[in-house]
Image (cartoon, rainbow, N blue to C red):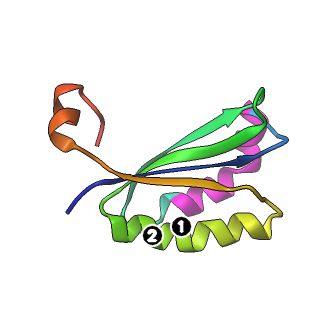
Amino acid sequence: MSLTLLQIDFPHEGPWGDEMAGAFEGLARDIAATPGLRWKIWTESRDAGRAGGIYLFDDAASAAAYLAIHVPRLESFGVRDIRTLEMQVNEQLDEITRAPH
């Protein structure tokens, strides 16, 4: 098993902060039930007009399965210019720098 980090971001005009948390609570609960997902960090940049997240999955297959569902879901909301990046995690170095798993 190789931990897989996934980054997704896309254009976003708001809401931000507390309003975003309230608006996306249901989506967050749905994402939390994703098989193989260890955690997600929600990201937002009002200045850049982008939002998204950093995800840690048990393996590449779980990350790929999530992408196959989440990208079409975002597109169904009218989101375009979705950027994704998938990378493997080096757990030996993570241990030294106290990365959460």
Q: How many marks?
A: 2
Name the kind of residue labelled 1 in the image: Leu
Q: Main secondary structure of the magenta part?
A: helix
Circles 1 and 2 in contact, beta carbons < 8 Å: yes
Locate residue 72: give its quadrant. Answer: bottom right
Q: Disc 2 on helix, strand or loop?
A: helix
Which residue appears at 38% of the width and 68% of the height? 62
- Left or right of 77? Residue 97 is left
Which residue is identified by label 1?
67
Q: Position of residue 69 (x, y in %)?
A: 58, 73
Which residue is identified by label 2?
64
Locate residue 79: give its quadrant. Answer: bottom right
Q: Which mark is residue 54?
A: none
Which residue appears at 50% of the width and 68% of the height? 66
Q: Position of residue 85 (x, y in %)?
A: 50, 52
29 lies above or below 13: below
Locate residue 43: give its quadrant. Answer: top right
Q: Report crowding for label 2: few under 14, some 14 to 19, many 20 or more residues within 10 A (C-alpha).
A: some
100 lies above or below 64: above
Q: Disc 1 on helix, strand or loop?
A: helix
37 lies above or below 93: below
> What is the magenta range?
17-31
